Amino acid sequence: MQRLEDAMWCHCFSATLKGIAQQWFGNLPTGYIDSFRKLAFLFASNFSMNIPTKKTSLNLSTIRKGEREGLCSYVRRINLVRIQIKGLSDKVVYTDFFKGQKDGSTFKFDLVQKRVFTL
């Protein structure tokens, strides 16, 4: 009875795969999978690296404005990370934003002249 149930789980699982995961499953040698437990282990060991890590405030603090990067681009990069961090305080964003700028930044000039922010 256990083998029948495992076979059913393996069949159902394979029907949910798409793209590269489906190709991976199709390339497994016939008879190689003898239990759902083995299938689950192989799948997790092959695809667990594809799970994106959750962003934290540490990710935000590593962003630095490039030497020739415009303010718009820098703000965009900050925001792409910021929106992925749950519960992030404005104070942390503000602090990391200014820390990430190089000395002698043209922040004021960029802000006024290029109209980066619209009201």
Image (tube, grey):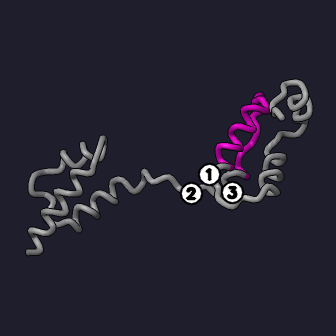
x and y percentages locating residue 99 in the rendered image = 82, 48
Report which residue position mark 2 lands on. 54
In the picture provided, is 12 more to the left or to the right than 4? right
In magenta, the rendered stretch is: 61-82
Hey, what amino acid is under mark 3? Leu
From the viewer's perspective, is residue 14 above or below residue 117?
below
Dot placed on the residue nearer the N-terminal end, 3 or 1: 3
Residue 68: image quadrant is: top right
Q: For marks 2 and 1, give the CA distance.
A: 8 Å
Report which residue position mark 3 lands on. 58
Hey, what amino acid is under mark 1? Gln
Q: Nearer the viewer, mark 2 or mark 3?
A: 2
Which quarter of the image is occupied by the C terminus?
A: top right
Asked if disc 2 and disc 3 are in contact, CB closer than 8 Å, the reply is no
| Secondary structure of the residue carrying numbered label 1 | loop
Residue 49: image quadrant is: bottom left
Name the residue rendered at 87%, 35% in the picture. Answer: 107
Report which residue position mark 1 lands on. 84
Asked if disc 2 and disc 1 are in contact, CB closer than 8 Å, the reply is yes
